[in-house]
Image (cartoon, rainbow, N blue to C red):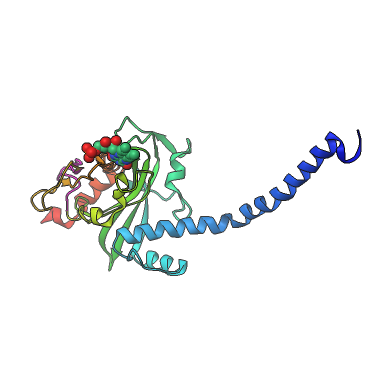
Amino acid sequence: MAGRESTAYTIGFAAIVCLVCALPIAGAAVLLKPRQELNQRIDRLEKVLAVAGLMERDEDLSAEAVEARFNEYVVPRPIDLRTGEFVDTIDVATYDQRRASRDPALSREAGENAARVFRIPLVGVAYEVVTNDQLQAIILPIQGYGLWSTMYGYLALEPDARTVSGITFYEHGETAGLGGEIENPRWQARWIGRQATDEQGVVQIEVIKGAAGPPESDPYRVDGLSGATITGRGVSATIDFWLGPEAFGPYLEAKRNASPARTR
Ligand SMILES: Cc1cc2nc3c(=O)[nH]c(=O)nc-3n(C[C@H](O)[C@H](O)[C@H](O)COP(=O)(O)O)c2cc1C
């Protein structure tokens, strides 16, 4: 057989079609990568600004405006999680803590934990909100397992490194209306003013089943999400891990010791 009916012709034709289709897609992926990375970075800055109360949820800012506001108020602090001390070995503008957790050279195995965090980055980035040289808030990236998925968010603490000033979850795969309520601003508002840890820095805060009292009389408990006890437990375990001794605990201890409340 020869010509258009031959097997070689069919395979050759299919190969050319694949190549012609693949080239523009591959080209677009390569060309758009810098734009995607910029968008991801701006997205991260927006999340930090929002949990710090420096940006309204429905505020629509250009990428430049987000960057400008972030640079005005927020200082990213790369921290050696084993010591709690600042490091200058990474470029915070390009460092991605989530990606570092997957890189064996940039992370280590985590001890057993209920948040199901398997690897922990050697360097974690805390964000300090500073105005007029005064620390206003500390924002920590957090991640842990709920019922179906890893939940990613940020927790904001007051300068005493204990009192919660905000929490947000921006990515998860929990069920909408059940565990997905971790995204609900009304539930997130229930955290504000509660104590994440006791005075010794031991994490005490937990999501309970049912309703908690006001922060003044019930500082360590947060309202549960109805029909989503397991997601709530995952959130408790997530805070427990990231504020604990294996993660940001040593850094927070240094902050607590430096806090003016301590010297009163
Ligand atoms: C389709 C489906 C989706 C569910 N999604 C969640 C969820 O996202 N988070 C969660 O904790 N429980 C979820 N549950 C419920 C759990 O199986 C479990 O019953 C619940 O966590 C118990 O919480 P409760 O004691 O508050 O009812 C789901 C159940 C079903 C049938």
| Ligand 1 in which quarter | top left
Q: As drawn, is 111 to the left or to the right of 30?
A: left
**Image quadrant for the N terminus?**
top right
Check residue 197 for magenta coloring: yes
The one nearer the camera, 128 or 177, is 177
User: Relative to the observer, which residue lies in front, 254 or 147?
Assistant: 147
Q: In this orientation, does residue 132 appear?
A: yes
Q: How many marks?
A: 0
Q: Is 40 colored magenta in this rendering?
A: no
Query: What residue span does the magenta drawing correspond to?
Result: 194-206
Which quadrant of the figure contains the C terminus? bottom left
Q: Residue furthest top?
A: 112
Q: Is residue 10 toward the left or the right of residue 157 in the image?
A: right
Find the residue positioned furthest to the left: 217
Which residue is found at the position 55% from the left and 59% from the top? 35
Q: Position of residue 14 (x, y in %)?
A: 76, 42
The residue located at (24%, 56%) in the rendering is 186
Magenta stretch, overall SS: loop
Residue 221 in which image quadrant: top left
* Residue 54: percent from left, percent from top: 31, 65
| In this rendering, position of residue 34 left or right of residue 15 | left
Task: Note whether residue 245 is visible.
Answer: no
Q: Position of residue 167 (x, y in %)?
A: 28, 53
